[in-house]
Image (spheres, rainbow, N blue to C red):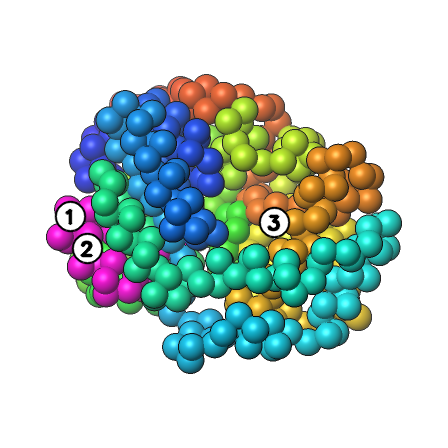
Amino acid sequence: MESRICEMLGIEFPLVAFTHSRYVVAEVSKAGGFGVLGAASMTPEQLEAELTWIDENIDGKPYGVDLIVPNKFIGKGDNTTPDGMIAMLPDEHKNFAEKILRAHDIDAEGVDDAARRETMVFSDNLTLEGAKKHLDIAFSHPIKLIANALGVPPREMMELGKQHGVAVAALVGAKSHAINQVQAGVDILVVAGGEAGGHCGAVSTMVLVPEIFEAIQDHGDTPILAAGGIVTGRQMAACMAMGASGVWTGSVWLTTTEAETAPVVKEKMLAASSSDTVRARSRTGKHSRQLRSPWTDAWEREDAPDPLAMPLQSLISEPALGKVERLSEGGHRGAQDLATYWVGQGVGLMNASQSVRNVVYDFKEDFINAHERLSKAVGT
């Protein structure tokens, strides 16, 4: 297929899959797309193990790695210790999280400072020092793309990308951010609309893609991967008609048989409509879209404390949600009600669990059918 993304990444079909599952990465790439491993919550040792497994199981096909190195967050640059970070957490927020658990017959045992220290790997990875460890590991493997999810990629990432011939991508949710990224020299823009799962802006994909495509022409024709609510080939075709060179997808892989998604959450997603998600700050401190549940509803109430800045809010939410996930897998009804995960509004079109390869093949077939319909409409 003729696409600048296909040329840059050495792939057959410009379908990029962001996932936390090494199995999904391998299967998407082997089916002609491009898998990207989300490594933000991994230790350096875990990342090394995951990339080694991918190298051994991807049949030489190309793949990439996604990191989160935000330009701003609480504690950045001031050498704050783990104990110092925990000391910043207000009792109001800790008590509110525990109150939600108790309302669903879950005690707060284990949702404490020890559990918060275990989640510190995410906070460490946000720093440039933590990112350097991941970058060294990532570039020791045959990756073809490195992506930064929040803000302009650090200088070290840009330099290593050029040195190793690896494309550097950046996620954006606003026109001004896109221009900044192009001027900084990124190779690929991932333009994510507000329909996207995880961190996202407020502007819809349908509006954002053509807006950014037009805006960057005077600054350099950087290829665009459209993102946000895209779970079908016809949506992919529509985005490419608006100027994208391919798509960046995430949610659609969460209900595949190879996904890391907890079974209870997967069942919720398969039954959900597009209105069963919420864009809120209550999980990480930055706006992210997730599956709606009594947990997310509670943080939207008037009596809820205002979410903390990144990464402090994660130290409140992740220990509690970690316990919710463990109990839900054991059949605890209250935990199953509370269970949530990041997912985009495209969840309303995700109605059956399939293998990764079948999803890729469905994308290709649906894309071709959409192209044929459009060609027929214009008489070609």
Magenta range: 148-168
**From the viewer's perspective, is 160 left or right of 309?**
left
Q: Residue furthest bottom?
A: 78
What residue sits 46% from the left and 71% below the top?
Answer: 73
Mark 1 is on which residue type? His
Residue 314: in magenta span: no
Q: Amino acid at mark 2?
A: Leu
- Mark 2 packing: few (<14 Cα in 10 Å), some, or many (20+)? some
| Dot label at residue 160 | 2
- Residue 330 pos. (x, y %): 75, 35
**In the image, what residue type sits under mark 3?**
Gln
What is the quadrant of residue 296 in the picture?
bottom right
Q: Nearer the viewer, residue 292 or 238?
A: 292
In the rendered view, would you say 141 is above or below 112? above
Q: Earlier in the sequence, mark 1 or mark 3?
A: 1
Does the residue at mark 1 contact the one at mark 2 (Cβ under 8 Å)? yes
The label on residue 290 is: 3
